[in-house]
Amino acid sequence: MTAIRISLSPVVEGAEDARRAGVAQRRHPSRFAARAEAASLRATNGSEIMFKALCRSLACGILTVLAGEAAAQSFPARPITMVVGFAPGGPADVVARLIAPSLGADLGQSVVVENASGAGGSIGQGRVAAARPDGHTILFGSLAQATIPTLLRNLSFDPQALEAIGLVNEVPMAIIARRDFLAANLAELVAVVRRDGRRMNLGNAGIGSTSHLCSLLLISAIGAPVTLVPYRGNALVMNDLMAGTLDLGCDQTTNNAQQIRGQTIRAYAISTPTRAAALPEVPTTAEAGLPAMSMSGWNMLFAPAGTPGPVVERLNRALLAALRDENVGRRLAELGSEPASGERTAPAGAQNFWRAEIARWKPLLEAAEAAN
């Protein structure tokens, strides 16, 4: 006889399983009670674990906020070191030393300027990156901080790991030359460079510096090569221009307005859309026939990455107080610059501006690197 196996439908099978389970539970009630208790305990323990994890997460967040607020209330606890990545006497150094007393007065602590020059400003930035992120060591940055991420590789620090505090000022760039340079105006200078550019030296404060970017933009606008000569700071460039041993420069008016007015060097144009109040006789590059040569230098305060938000805000309030200082405003005007204003003086606006500048200059820097 052939055995016939009948397969029940899932519904029938499910009902049969339930019937058998009911019979087993009636025969062994204690065993099933123990299983139910274990399942309940597992569910309870899982909920408790999740609840405890949530509490720990919330506690950490609350503690972080409280720690930041406590840090801001006790900040600053000692003098603040403001690092400048370029040599003494250069444009960044001049403006840093100009605002330092006003910053200190608002913060109630001295602000000490420390020069850590070299490698296009990266040595100073590295000094700040390695500092404790508590606001007591800050960077007086410049356009160099927008070039370091593109130009310099294999650094010991992340070149974009900075917290912007606020924009300090913007400043025109002046195309300058030694006093006896044989060109009466910018058009003649362009003609001379196109003819003899390779025999001419154009100084800058180091690869990645603001004056280096100005030099690259000038060469691009003229369309002819010039020998670039990097120095360890703008002050050294100015010394050689005044001595007549360097042909050309492209530098911030904060570093050369006095020499231009004193006629110890020649100025051919200002790189901004409008003339500089400190040098009203110097035409803009657009007026002089080179509109592609348009840029501004700038300075910005930065804190190390990870600095508590309330500390950054406190430093920003001190910066805004310094920018409202009449003495600071008057002295910046004498140097051909002016205090920053608007949303870029706030941390978020400054951070966005800095990121945009990194993106703006990257193609020009990469093209210059490829050409070499």
Image: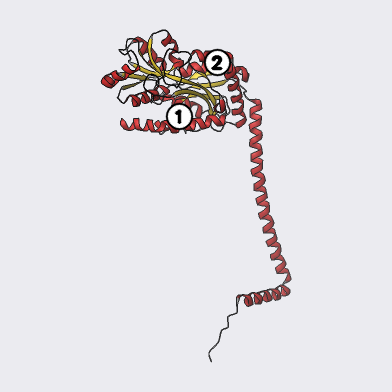
Q: How many marks?
A: 2
Q: Residues within 10 Å of mark 1 (few under 14, many from 20)?
A: many
Q: Is residue 12 above or below residue 173?
A: below
Q: Nearer the viewer, residue 96 or 64?
A: 96
Answer whether labels 1 and 2 touch (C-beta < 8 Å).
no
Q: In the image, which is nearer the foreground, mark 1 or mark 2?
A: 2
| Observer able to see residue 223 | yes
Measured as percent of width and height from the top left, residue 142 is found at 47, 24
User: In this figure, which residue is indicated by the disc labeled 2?
Assistant: 329
- Residue at horizontal 43%, vertical 12%? 281
- Specify the label residue 297 is tagged with: none
- Residue at horizontal 51%, vertical 24%? 300
Measured as percent of width and height from the top left, residue 336 is found at 48, 15
Chain-order first, disc 1 or disc 2: 1
226 displayed left or right of 316:
left
Question: How is the structure coloured here?
Answer: secondary structure
Q: Is residue 2 above or below residue 22?
A: below
Locate residue 4: give its quadrant: bottom right
Q: Nearer the viewer, residue 20 or 323?
A: 323
Measured as percent of width and height from the top left, residue 100 is found at 55, 17
101 displayed left or right of 15:
left
Q: Amino acid at mark 1?
A: Ala
User: In this figure, which residue is indicated by the disc labeled 1?
Assistant: 146
Residue lying furthest top: 262
Locate residue 340: give its quadrant: top right
Residue lying furthest bottom: 1
Q: Amino acid at mark 2?
A: Gly
